[in-house]
Amino acid sequence: MTSTSPHRVCTRCVMDTSDPEISFDADGVCNHCIEFDTVTRKQWFPDERGEKLWQAEIERIKREGQGKPYDSILGLSGGVDSSYLALKVHEAGLRPLVVHVDAGWNSELAVANIEKIVKHCNFDLHTHVINWEDMRDLHLAYLKSGVANQDVPQDHAFFASMYHFAVGNGINTIFSGGNTATEGVFPTAWHGSAMDAINLKAIHKRFGSRKLKSYPTIGFFEYYFYFPFIRKMRTVRPLNYMPFDKQSAIDELEQKIGWRSYGRKHGESLFTKLFQNYYLPRKFGYDKRLPHYSSLIVSGQMTREAALAALAEPLYDPVELETDLNYFCKKLRITRDELEKILAQPSHHHTDFPTWQRHQKLAKSAQKLLERVRGRRISVYS
């Protein structure tokens, strides 16, 4: 089967020239595949080495957590990745404080899945509900800004809440469901960082209509210096230390705890569902299935032929789309005509607004200076 896309498509995965920064070698293989083989794969350990690394992390976390109510913190959305991670953390005998951040878009199925996971693992769950008026104003500000990464208000709140809860409970280890097996390919040109509070505040200042009352944020200094160097916090991605096959993980979750599949990646959030499958394709021509399927291809979980067949299917059922759009507008308290006018406005790149890039360059220069002075590489992921 061949793709009907007007774009040039990689001969190995399904990424195409909708990524403006994509490039191809003489065989038509894209830079994403090449980077996965030469760089990303080296940070992925679905083998015996991964087992040893994971066991070492388990022992460290248990040791550092002695005498504390919790030895780690785990963000739970109810999606496949975080749900499977919770199960594996439970089976490792760890004691995480499970945090769920409710930004107002949970599907009923997500709530049910979270309840099943927490009950099965006997974990303490803290649900942090974000002030809806804050979220609504941020969502509208981002829509009016015309940037691609409309999920930043939701994602930033998730991560910021987790870090603040970790500090408040004296926890140094944060578990992340991020993984190479299903997220190894990602076109960075499509989005900016969800952690860039400078960009978030600049967009809200320009297009927001009210002051944010309690929306949680993380500043550049906190993220790059305070949390990793002063608080000694570390983010661990256990799914990179084990064979993580998406369908096998779903099967295991269904069999062990009665977890139910959403049918699509990030289907646990009604906002993310509409954002990825309607907003991005319509306004920017970005199909998030491309990097998702490409990740599964390069990690050996999906064939290119199967991915092309899946891409030929429609992104949305028309009746379902109409229902979701009506709900979306009702929740944001805008009309469909107002939404159409917003979508018709010119698109913008997130760098059209202030970002933390200048701060990153300064931090990188300081890192290189310290590495020269100390004679060794400094690498901290917080």
Image: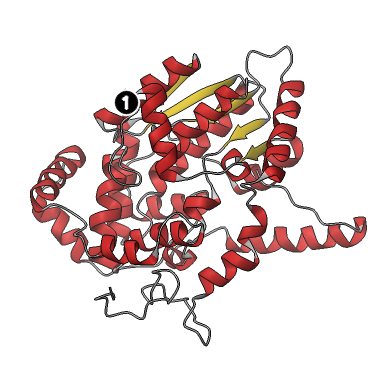
**Residue 253 position (above or below residue 325):** above
Position of residue 208 measured from the top left corner of the image (x, y, whole percent)? 33, 48
**Quadrant that contains the C terminus:** top right
Within 10 Å of the Cα at label 1, are there few (<14), some (14-19), or many (20+) other Cα atoms? some
Position of residue 345 measured from the top left corner of the image (x, y, whole percent)? 22, 66
**Residue 234 position (above or below residue 37):** above
Q: Tell me if 262 is positioned left or right of 361 in this view.
A: left
- Tell me which corner region of the image, top left, top right, bottom left or bottom right, holds residue 375: bottom right
**Residue 119 position (above or below residue 100):** above
The residue lying at 60 percent from left, 45 percent from top is 240
Q: Nearer the viewer, residue 257 or 61?
A: 257
Report if residue 359 is visible in the image. Answer: no
The residue lying at 43 percent from left, 32 percent from top is 252
Position of residue 22 measured from the top left corner of the image (x, y, whole percent)? 47, 76
Q: Tell me if 233 is positioned left or right of 284 in this view.
A: right
Report if residue 333 is visible in the image. Answer: yes
Question: Looking at numbered disc 1 in the image, what kind of residue is underneath it?
Answer: Val
- Tell me which corner region of the image, top left, top right, bottom left or bottom right, holds residue 19: bottom left
Residue at numbered disc 1? 111
The residue lying at 34 percent from left, 62 percent from top is 307
Q: Secondary structure at mark 1?
A: helix
Q: Nearer the viewer, residue 35 or 349?
A: 35
**Residue 175 position (above or below residue 293):** above
The residue lying at 52 percent from left, 88 percent from top is 26
Colour approach in the figure: secondary structure
